[in-house]
Image (spheres, rainbow, N blue to C red):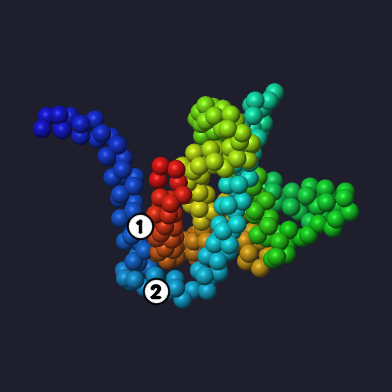
Amino acid sequence: MRDKWAGYKFISPWLIGVLLFTAFPMIFAAYISLTDWPILGSSRFIGLANFKEIFTDKEFYQSLMVTARYAVLAVPIGIISSFIMALLMNFKIKGVSIYRTIYYLPAVVSGVAVAVIWRWILNPNYGVVNMMLGWIGVQGPNWLGDPNWVLPSYLLIAIWGSGSAILTYIVGLKDISNELYEAATIDGAGFFKKLTKITIPLMTPILYYNLIMGIVAAFRKFTDAYIIGGAGNEGRFYMVNLYENAFSYYRMGYATALAWVLFIIILSLTLLINKSSKKWMYGG
């Protein structure tokens, strides 16, 4: 018993932190979702009325659809592009560390600054993208002013900001034993054979991690979406809808209910991927 109590004493700072900053906020958020709380006034308990309203709210379905379309495209595109870049930067070439630093920079730059810069880059009149397209005789689209081009605009931003995933891939590639590649070379395997039979199977745990993190990030997309926006509500992502309900319409109870619905969606997708990972992940 003394040893057990000693162990509890050592982990007590962590336990206190979990209770104060995780457990209590979640319990309080569950209560808020059952109230009508205008922030500035007193709250009123209304039971499951917020959740019933969510599933009859057109803005909920519209923002969820915008976010889901983005996630379906941005997550695989980000995984594939960052994995390819990691493969290229895994070669021993001069100055490779500089390229790694450049590609990782978007992960540490302020989200607000990134949004402002991309709003300028995608400007249809004086933006860099349309200017470069004009050099080759292509008329650039109205990226954020045309509803059909809002999603491609955000996909460009997602590809540009996939540097943090590149770092994890490089670490995983460095961990693969060279003896496996040497044995495959002796057996006559080429680059693509090594890639499909050695590299990708052994990298599936990293792919799994980046898939989960990519889905979470896609459904929690907020900063650049809130600042950049998009025509026809195509830039109104789920988190933007949640934020506006909380701090523009002062409906904190309803916004908290939206947050719980988002939590359930992400949790369900995570459990689904976790269950399917046993069939495709190495060591799963």
- Give the residue displayed 64% in from the left and 29% down from the top: 91
- Is residue 47 found left or right of 91 in the rendered image? left
Judged from this view, the residue extending furthest toward the top is: 94
**Residue 55, image x and y in percent?**
44, 73
Q: What residue is disc 1 on?
A: 29
The kind of residue on which mark 1 rests is: Ala
**Does the image show residue 163?**
no
Give above or below for 36 relative to 118. Answer: below
The residue indicated by pointer 2 is 52
Mark nearer the N terminus (2 vs 1): 1
**Viewer-proximal residue among 105 and 137:** 137
Residue sitting at the far front: 187
- For the C terminus, the image quarter is top left
Badge 2: how crowded within 10 Å, few (<14), some, or many (20+)? Answer: few
Instruction: Name the image quarter holding the N terminus.
Output: top left
Describe the element under mark 2 as helix, strand or loop.
helix
SS for callout 1? helix
Amino acid at the residue labelled 2 = Lys
Nearest the viewer among 269 and 61 is: 269
Which dot, 2 or 1, sits closer to the camera?
2
Tag 1: Cα neighbours inside 10 Å, few (<14), some, or many (≥20)? some
